[in-house]
Every structure is written in structure tokens, then in C-alpha cells.
Image: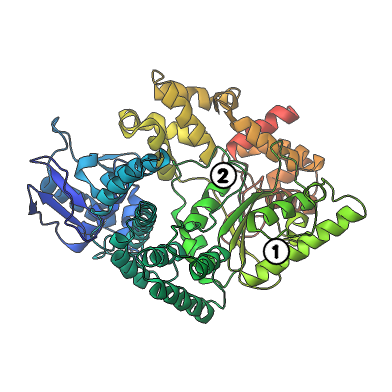
Amino acid sequence: MTRPPVRTAPAGAVYFSLLGPLTARLDGHELPLGPRKQRLVLATLLSRPNTPVPVEVLTDAVWPDDPPRTARKNLQVYVSAARTLLGPAGHEGRDRVVHGCGGYLLRIAEGELDTLRFGSLARAGRAAAGRGDLAGAARLLREALDLWEGPPLNDLRDSAGVAEEAGRLEARCLTVYEDWAETEIELGRPAVAVDGLRDLVERHPLRERLRAAWMNSLHQSGRQAEALAVYDDYRQLMARELGLEPSPAMAALYRSMLGRGREARRPAPAREAVGPAAPPSCTAAFTGRPGELRELLEVLGCGEERVVVVSGPAGAGKSALALRAAHLLADRFPDGRVRVRMRREDGRARSRAEILAELGRLCGVAGNAASPGNAASPEGGPGGDRAATAALADAWQEWQARHRALVVLDDVPDEASVRGLLSRSGKCSVLITARGQLAGLAPVHRIALPALADGEALELLGKLIGAGRLRADPGAALRIVRACGGLPLAVEVSGMRLAVLRHLPLAEYADRLDDPSAALDELVAGDVSVRHRIASGWQDLADGDRWVLGRLAGLAEGGGFTLDRAAEALGCGERAAIRAVESLIDAGAVTSPAGEVTAHAALYEVPRLLGLYAHEREGV
């Protein structure tokens, strides 16, 4: 941030900047962006370039507490003023801002928006580093950082929606700065990074990777006493603010500086959410869930709740949401974020011994508790294997008591599989994803994932097939996402399939999905199958619950069913019907109203695709 920003827009084109205060320039002259509410609308659209932004998102950004009755009309006025101010997009003279079924979309080219240019340069720099071209990587990463003028959108952060986007942008900038500084250190040019790192550490004192790079740059510049003082300040800060010691990686870097000269040492990164590969639904197309993501960040970030359960049917995007939250919570968990899958590839639950052994490998806590063969024994084994598993469990509890980390236990089959893994003391937090509600766990904070709203689902589909194709037939696009039941995995598979079958009209594909007998056959893209994922959830149900679900699925086709209709379909009394329906709610196979309502007045629903699968299996 020490050089003048690089502007890349061609003559006659508007150049927008979010990496600092919101600005727009035309041929070097700053354009007036209007009143504050109009600038909030523009900032929100620019934060999601070339992507439909639902009206609800814009409304929340401008009027977070109590939107007026005229909110939609006011938004239209702000958008109209922006169109007039910004002019057409590109040489074709197309409208800069367009409206479709997914919301408002702002057309923007890479050379017209600093965040797009920033992302492109950062990717190129990391690719160069991966090829071993450190000099090229340093140049490209520095060019990206030259676009960063200060805290992103710092003039509009009193809006919660804009502040959330600004926080994500700043986190991206910090990560690129860390990449650049470490690259310069490896090149033997540590002095160029010292001052900038010092300024950033003052603003982000608990960001360990920044502090480690600052220590290293000072040490490699021959300023060893200052480097050691940086560590000592950090150790005292951690003890005072969090009651923790620096991470093992940071302590090892400190020890190496005590015992060595200027030998270059790249600091070990903090543990990210690691483990087996993420499921197909966890892609860069992650979108939607702003309320649930905000709740997760608030609950886990404040440190008051140590266990959070995110529940929802197979394909609801639980893993994607959990990994997104874990990524954004880096500053709150200095000892790392660790992810472990709780099931094997075939959907069967992994044993406690397997889980503990993997946690031990990821966090370095296995010690001498067990040999690798014993630790991975499928059932813990008799005698020595049971003792080894118990030793691993004790070591894991001891590690949690001494660290502040976020542990993501992904796709948990039942309560029993996690009880022995939850921390009994210390400041570790656990984020659990599960298809069922896991009602037997307490106390926990619960977040249930509903189906995506139409606007969110359309935004996800548009990211995969292109905004232009979405706008060409918005009615068919809406039919597609509704036929998917708002299930993120189904919408994503539809998008992946349509991205390959570019000749296929959206309306024709919507017709296929509308056909109950063909919908699940259509929801396949390569080796990603919605039917396969739903089948895994089906296997979790008890035999009696499967039969009940098959009977209730037919009732749900009309938009839901009441308790009276359920009792009639099941051929049982009221009390038995209540128990049957609530058992399926607990298993995540039936949804109920979010607010309080009597069992008789409630309208229950079976997700469309799960209902179609139940028809197949039960022959209803």
C-alpha cells in the first residue's frame, strides 16, 4: 500500500474501486456517486460483479432494521440514477445495470473494477510461485497489492451487509500480503516487507501469519532483537486476551531464531480446515445463506458457544457453509481450523478410533499413545487396541484444553459418534454438520438449513451457466431451481449439466425436471449424482421411518400436509401420527414451521427430491 494505485481501465471507461473508499473514475476524474443510500446500492452490486443480486439483499444493505414500504421503488430510483451516471457497458452500448428474476446485475469488466483485477493478479502470482518462479510471483502479488488503498469500503461500513462484504475483501488482501511478504523473504529481500508488515500487525494483532512474516523479515534483515521482541509481545497479548500460548509453529520459529543466524525460514501456515477432499457441493460457486453464515460467525466468533450443530438434508450445503465459516474465522482461532469427515466414502460411519487417529495426525497429539495400526483399527479392537484408543482420547482432550482451535466434524451420523470428541474444558469450538437434528446433544447452538430462496438459487445457477444465459429465459431458470426444491446440490448439478450441454434450452431442461419420473435421472453431472446423495440419507432412516416417509411423500406434492392428513395416510391415531412425523423431523427428512405453532395447525413438508426418491423405493 505504499505505491500509487495502478489503474487499468481504457480511455472512456469507468473505473470502480472498492479496495478503499468507494470511488468511480472516468478518464482520471472522480464521478459523484450520489447520496449515501445510492452508494450503498452501488457498493453491494459491485461486491457481486456480473451476478444477480436479489432485491432482498439490497434492501438489507440500505435499510437493515426497518425498510420503508416504498423500499422497492426507492431502489428503482437509485438504480436508475446509477444507470444515468455510469452510462453503457462496453462497446456494444448495453445497459450497465439490468434487472431480471434473480435481482439487479451490474455489468463490469476486469479492467473496470479493482477487486476483479486484484483477484486475477493474485491467482497469477500464486500460479507463478507454484511453478517455482518466485521473482515473477513477487512482482504479480505486489501489483495486486498496489490496488489496495486501505480498509475496503471504509466509508460505508456502518451498513452490516456492506461491512460483511468489506471484511471478506480485507481478509483476501491480507492473505495476498502474507503471500507476497513470504515470497520476498525467500528471495532474500526481507527489508522491503518490514514496514508494511509492522503497520498491518498493529491493525490485526492476533493474525499469526502476519506476525510470523514480520518476525522473519526483521530477523533476515539482521534485526534479531526486534524479531524476538515481536514474539514476546505476541506471547503476552495471547496470554492477556485469550489465555493461550502461541501456536507450536510460532514457538518453533522463535526457537529457530534463538539458535540460528539469518537462515531463511518460511513460517508454517496456520492449520486450515483440512482433511479428506470436500464433497462435490463445496465449490467456488458457494452462494446464498447470508443469514446462516452471519449467525455462525457471530456465535463462533464471540466465543460464548463452544458447540454448533448445522443440520439439513443431504445436499443442503452444510459442508460448504461450515468450510466457508471456518475460513472466515481464521483470526478467532489462532491454533488452527481442522476438518474431519465422520463417514467413509460409502456413507458408513467411521469408528471412534479412526477419527481420533486422524485428529491426532492433523494436530500432532497422537504421541506414543498407539501404533498407527492399532489407532486405525475399525472397532478399536480388544485389549491393547481399546487401551490405545483410550490413550488417544485422553491426548485429544488434553490438546483441546491447551489450544484455541475450531474443529469441524463433518457429516456426523449420530450423537454417540461425537460425544467423546467434544472438549470438556478449554477454548476450542466444535462445528458439527449432520443430516439429523442430533437432539441428544446439549447444550449446543442449532442452525437448520432451509431450502434456498428463489433469488439465492438463481444466483447459484447463474454463476455456473452464465448471467447472460440466465437472463435469456428467466422464467425457465426459475422453474429449474424450483424443480430442484431449492436444494443447493441439485441446483449446482443442474448448472454443471447445463454448462456442458450449452445447446440445451433452459425451458426443455425445466420440462425434464418437472417430470417426477425423470427428475432424479436428470440430476447427474459426471460422477456427481443427486440420487446417490439422497440414497445415503435414506439409508440413515430406520425401516419404519422409511415406510412412513413413503406414505407422507405423496401428501407433500400439494405443498405440504397437516397432522390430520398424516394420520389418515398412515392409518393410525393422532398420537402415533405425531410421533411418526416428529421422528422424521428429528432425522431431517420432514421440515416444520420455523415459528411456534401447535402440531395440528402446522403445515409439514417433505423436500421434493427426497419425496421422489421415497416414491421410487416404497412404490407408493
Query: Which residue is identified by label 2?
Result: 316
Q: Which mark is residue 422?
A: 1
Q: Residue furthest front?
A: 261
Residue 228: x and y, percent? 45, 74
Rate crowding at label 1 as few (under 14), some (14 to 19) or many (20 or more) other CA atoms within 10 Å.
some
Residue 340: x and y, percent? 64, 50
Q: Quick one: label 1 or label 2, which is nearer the N terminus? A: 2
Residue 197: x and y, percent? 34, 65
Whether residue 166 is situated above or below residue 121 in the rendered picture: below
Give residue 36's quadrant in the image: bottom left
Q: Secondary structure at mark 1?
A: loop
Answer left or right for 542 relative to 258: right
Q: Where does the N terminus fall, quadrant-wise?
A: bottom left
Say what amino acid the circle numbered 1 marks.
Leu
Say what amino acid the circle numbered 2 marks.
Ala
**Mark 1 or mark 2, which is nearer to you?**
1
Q: Residue at x 22, y 55 (%)?
A: 74
Q: Residue at x 78, y 52 (%)?
A: 353
Answer left or right for 522 relative to 532: left
Q: Where does the C terminus fall, quadrant-wise?
A: top right
Answer whether residue 443 is visible to the viewer in this image. Answer: no
Give residue 569's quadrant in the image: top right
Q: Residue at x 63, y 44 (%)?
A: 561
Q: Secondary structure at mark 2?
A: loop
